[in-house]
Image: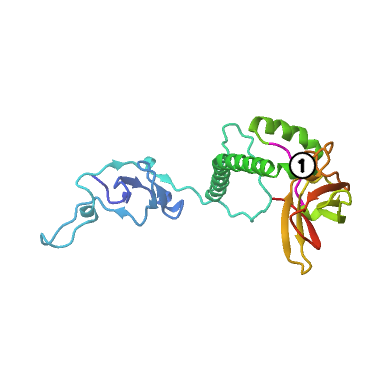
Amino acid sequence: MATPDEKFTRCPSCSTVFRVTAPQLALRDGQVRCGHCRAVFDGVAHLISLAPSVRAEPDMGHDELSAGPPTMTLRSSRALQAAPAPAPLREPSFAPEPASSVPGDTVAAPTPAKQSVRQRFTWERNKRTSTLAGRRPLVAAVALLSLLLAGQAIFHFRDAVAARWPSSKPLLTGVCEIAGCTIRPLRDVAGLAIDASDLQADPSHKGLLILTATIRNRASVPLAFPYLELTLTDSNDQVVVRRALAPLEYAGGTTDIAGGVPANGEVLVKLFIDASTTSQAGYRLYVFYP
């Protein structure tokens, strides 16, 4: 049974009751640590009395133990520890503290802010890697389509490519041997001109006309031989007859028609035309490509 001078305090966390002394309560202004659950509490504020109280009536008042559990654990004062002293205040310092060299020390875990930044950088790096990996098939498809488009354009304009870049002609010729196409001189009627032409009656043969002309290539690349359009007119400049002449009809037998009119070169034309059934007073001569 408790003596009148004994003091008891109860832990508000686990309801364990401790014998305490006045010096023990005065050590930290009453702040003590429970030796059972390690909770820190005010031992003075939670002092209780274990002495039985006399009740005048059954329904009047109750002692401090009436709020506790049906059973309680009573421990000596040695099980009650003084609360740890508060850490001394330090002046704020902006210099980083050196890492501890004491064995057994561990590096402090990164703060939530640092973890968030690190996670964000990791996520962005993974996102970039994933995006690049996802774009690789698209890049490959675009590159393939670009090559196919370039090949189609070169094939379609193979004559112009061979004319502008003669070094590519052997390669294009080899491709055409497989594809069944041909490399022809470039067709550019704007690069051709008729420098001089004349139509005269042949004095040795009645009804026979002699056409002479000079076709000049003003371009820097060979151009395909054009067609000639000869129009005979009457005295009123009305069309009497019109005829288209192919290169084989007006070019000489030794002319390289497949090679085209040489760059900055010219071709002389001399053609005999039977006009015995017509009567004409003038003519017009043009070059064109069908």
Q: What stretch is highlighted in magenta?
A: 182-188
Residue at image mark 1: 248
176 vs 123, nearest the viewer: 176
Residue at 26% across, 46% down = 2
In the image, is residue 169 above or below residue 119? above
State whether residue 175 appears in this view.
yes
State whether residue 217 appears in this view.
no
Rendered location of residue 86, percent (x, y)? 51, 52
274 vs 214, nearest the viewer: 274
In the image, is residue 140 above or below residue 32? above
Residue 146 located left or right of residue 228: left
What secondary structure is the magenta-colored segment mainly?
Answer: loop
Residue 127 located left or right of residue 268: left
Q: What residue type is labelled 1?
A: Leu
Residue at 26% across, 53% down = 49
The image quadrant where one finds the N terminus is top left
Q: Which residue lies furthest to the left in this view?
A: 58
Binning the other alpha carbons within 10 Å of mark 1 as few (below 14), some (14 to 19) or many (20 upward) gives few
Quick check: is 185 in the magenta stretch?
A: yes
